[in-house]
Image (spheres, helix red, strand yellow):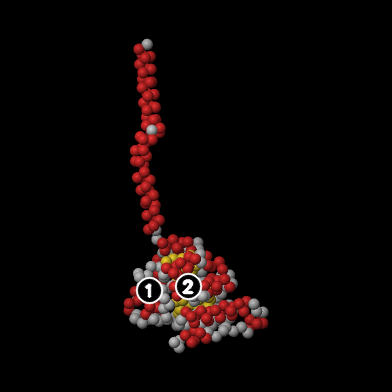
């Protein structure tokens, strides 16, 4: 009997302890709060770490990865307030080219607009494009920079530095000025294999795609990211302070003539103006023309006037018969020609 009583007492104690512990853990809110409070700092720390990772993640890499194709290739153009202001700003005309062009509409999905000020960034976001706000270290890149002015040269060098960063992130790109109309998809006329490092437009094509005698134009080019092209941009930008009065395009041409392309082992192709034309040298064949660049022009106002004429010419060509195509002529670039008189 004593053994049975002892067992009953033991069971009773075990049951009391079990229910007591259960009550403390789950049923008594006053006692459970300290236990929960011990877990909160761990959850908060995890959330804080994740938040910091999101905040400090490379914003440029996010913009590039969102915009690029699967093989890390994208289109890039750079704008400031002067290119988004007005009744018909340059950015809008640039986008019109993709709308009226042949097989160009979907290319906008891989176009990154790089804004040099808040106004142009907000305009880009309003248009629901891929946008990136470029930090300019409080330098004023808002207003129009006339060709070859000191501020124009500074803006071109800031562009070069940014594009070097894109290469260092491992992305290939076509850089295009905003005053370039894309009338056809350019990729069928570009070498898409990785052996061609740089394909660059020319002001006047001399007939030889491999000749360094071609006068290059940095307003349109395709470049692959590799050690050679990054070294090119490093050398190019390193000459910024030793080139007073020269724009970045002049410096690149000088380096080319000094043998830098060959020294780096770069494979460079100079683009034919039949396909990649400009106001310096019109395409001779409207049935082949791919891009039209408002080069050899000094002001935005003049570029807008003459590029609008190009849009009208293109629409006229698209609505014409084969016989009319044979007699097609581009409109004179009168505004751009007159822009040099002021």
Q: Is residue 190 left or right of residue 18?
A: right
Count of labels in the image: 2
Task: Tell me the quarter of the picture where residue 184 sits.
Answer: bottom right
Q: Residue at x 40, y 61 (%)?
A: 58
Name the element at disc 2: loop
Q: Position of residue 202 (x, y in %)?
A: 48, 80
Q: Is residue 121 left or right of residue 323?
A: left
State if disc 2 and disc 1 touch (CB < 8 Å).
no
Q: In the orientation shown, which residue stands out farthest toward the bottom?
A: 341
Closer to us: 149 or 161: 149
Q: Quadrant of the C terminus?
A: bottom left
Q: Which residue is mark 1?
A: 140
- Residue 115 is at least partly visible in this image: no
Closer to us: 84 or 55: 84
Q: Residue at x 42, y 68 (%)?
A: 118
Q: Residue at x 41, y 73 (%)?
A: 142
Name the element at disc 1: loop
Q: Which residue is mark 2?
A: 84
Vertical relation: 97 (above or below) 323: above
Q: Is residue 174 left or right of residue 56?
A: right
Say which label, 1 or 2, has the lower sequence index.
2
Q: Residues within 10 Å of mark 1 (few under 14, many from 20)?
A: few
Q: Position of residue 303 (x, y in %)?
A: 49, 80
Closer to us: 164 or 158: 158
Q: CA distance from mark 1 to mark 2?
A: 16 Å
Q: Is residue 261 left or right of residue 279?
A: left
Q: Position of residue 36 (x, y in %)?
A: 37, 39
- Residue 39 is at least partly visible in this image: yes
Closer to us: 14 or 173: 14
Vertical relation: 297 (above or below) 71: below
């Amino acid at each position: 009997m004593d053994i049975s009583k002892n067992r009953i007492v033991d069971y009773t104690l075990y049951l009391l302890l079990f229910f007591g512990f259960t009550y403390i853990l789950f049923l008594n809110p006053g006692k459970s709060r300290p236990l929960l409070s011990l877990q909160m700092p761990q959850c908060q720390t995890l959330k804080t770490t994740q938040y910091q990772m999101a905040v400090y993640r490379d914003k440029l890499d996010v913009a590039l990865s969102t915009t690029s194709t699967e093989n890390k290739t994208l289109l890039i153009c750079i704008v400031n307030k002067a290119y988004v202001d007005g009744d018909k700003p340059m950015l809008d005309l640039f986008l019109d080219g993709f709308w009226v062009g042949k097989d160009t509409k979907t290319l906008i999905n891989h176009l990154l607009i790089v804004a040099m000020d808040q106004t142009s960034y907000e305009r880009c976001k309003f248009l629901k494009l891929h946008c990136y706000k470029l930090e300019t270290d409080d330098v004023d890149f808002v207003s129009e920079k006339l060709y070859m002015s000191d501020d124009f040269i500074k803006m071109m060098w800031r562009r070069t530095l940014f594009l070097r960063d894109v290469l260092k992130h491992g992305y290939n790109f076509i850089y295009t000025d905003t005053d370039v109309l894309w009338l056809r998809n350019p990729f069928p006329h570009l070498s898409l294999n990785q052996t061609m490092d740089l394909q660059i437009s020319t002001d006047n094509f001399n007939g030889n795609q491999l000749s360094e005698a071609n006068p290059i134009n940095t307003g349109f080019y395709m470049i692959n990211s590799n050690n050679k092209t990054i070294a090119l941009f490093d050398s190019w930008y390193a000459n910024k302070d030793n080139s007073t009065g020269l724009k970045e395009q002049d410096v690149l041409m000088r380096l080319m003539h000094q043998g830098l392309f060959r020294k780096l082992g770069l494979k460079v192709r100079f683009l034919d103006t039949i396909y990649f034309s400009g106001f310096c040298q019109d395409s001779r064949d409207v049935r082949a023309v791919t891009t039209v660049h408002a080069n050899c022009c000094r002001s935005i106002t003049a570029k807008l006037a003459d590029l609008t004429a190009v849009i009208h010419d293109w629409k006229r060509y698209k609505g014409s018969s084969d016989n009319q195509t044979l007699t097609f002529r581009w409109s004179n670039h009168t505004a751009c020609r007159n822009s040099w008189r002021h």
